[in-house]
Image (cartoon, rainbow, N blue to C red):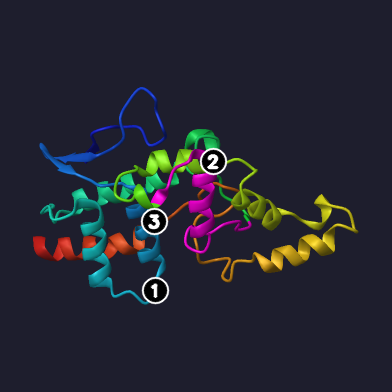
């Protein structure tokens, strides 16, 4: 599989990925930011039925198109999607996020209201009006460029603060603020660390699709 545009980071000289090709045929793919965020929600929800998850993910990105039930196609799509959502301009030489111990500092779902407010404040962009339209790559670039004057970035900075970053007198106030803005489950939501995405692994979900494709090929 090949994406019709090879850039996974914002590139001012080329367009966004909007289709993939496989064995001479092109398939349109909708990578609007809200579709990607819905994808994050689906694969993070352990209560979602696998068959529903599989069909919903395909519907999210390919709509009503009939896609190949071919392991090679599905593996290529998984690789492309992982590379897209984990692409970072300044970590690991512009590839996936650096590994290591990282403290979660924001949540796409729990901080959704503040993300909306931050885009309005910073760019005068109402994300509710951009659903289904703004490509993930553009959304992520704008998100990474949010000013520290926005409440979202101020809260992220509070969550990242450690006792060694402030004086003894300041720490009680910061610690209380961290409780106020804490995220309930620090291991559940993606991404992690600063404003950058931690590696987001879709393998478990795609394995079910691949198993189904292999059975069809028997």
Provide the residue designation for mark 2.
122
Using a 10 Å C-alpha cutoff, classify the residue at mark 1 as few (fewer than 14 neighbours), some (14 to 19) or many (20 or more): few
State the quadrant of the N terminus: top left
169 horizontally vs 9: left or right: right
Q: Earlier in the sequence, mark 2 or mark 3?
A: 3
Query: Which residue lies at the image location 25% right of the left edge and 56% below the top edge?
Result: 60
Query: Which residue lies at the image location 26% right of the left edge and 60% below the top edge?
Result: 57
Task: In the rendered structure, find residue 146 and report the number of the disc placed on it.
Answer: none
| Image spot of residue 175 (x, y percent) | 77, 64
Q: CA distance from mark 1 to mark 2?
A: 35 Å
* Range covered by the magenta-colored residues: 103-127
Q: Earlier in the sequence, mark 1 or mark 2?
A: 1
Q: Secondary structure at mark 2?
A: helix
Provide the residue designation for mark 3.
37
Q: Earlier in the sequence, mark 3 or mark 1?
A: 3
Query: Which residue lies at the image location 68% right of the left edge and 68% below the top edge?
Result: 180
| Image spot of residue 190 (x, y percent) | 49, 58
Based on the displayed image, in which of its 4 quarters is residue 52 positioned? Answer: bottom left
| Viewer-nearest residue: 15 or 85 | 15
Task: In the rendered structure, find residue 46 and report the number of the disc placed on it.
Answer: 1
């Amino acid at each position: 599989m090949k994406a019709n545009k090879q850039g996974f980071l914002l590139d001012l000289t080329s367009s966004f990925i909007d289709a993939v090709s496989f064995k001479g045929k092109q398939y349109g793919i909708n990578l609007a930011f809200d579709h990607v965020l819905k994808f994050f929600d689906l694969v993070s929800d352990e209560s979602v039925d696998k068959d529903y998850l599989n069909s919903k993910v395909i519907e999210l990105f390919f709509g009503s198109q009939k896609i190949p039930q071919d392991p090679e196609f599905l593996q290529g799509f998984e690789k492309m999607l992982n590379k897209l959502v984990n692409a970072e301009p300044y970590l690991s030489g512009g590839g996936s996020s650096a590994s290591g111990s990282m403290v979660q500092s924001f949540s796409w779902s729990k901080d959704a209201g503040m993300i909306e407010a931050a885009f309005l404040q910073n760019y005068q962009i109402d994300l509710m009006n951009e659903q289904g339209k703004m490509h993930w790559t553009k959304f992520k670039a704008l998100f990474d460029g949010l000013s520290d004057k926005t409440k979202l970035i101020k809260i992220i900075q509070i969550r990242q603060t450690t006792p060694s970053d402030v004086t003894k007198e300041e720490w009680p106030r910061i610690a209380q603020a961290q409780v106020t803005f804490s995220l309930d489950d620090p291991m559940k939501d993606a991404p992690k660390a600063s404003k950058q995405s931690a590696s987001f692994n879709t393998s478990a979900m795609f394995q079910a699709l691949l198993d189904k494709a292999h059975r069809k090929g028997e």
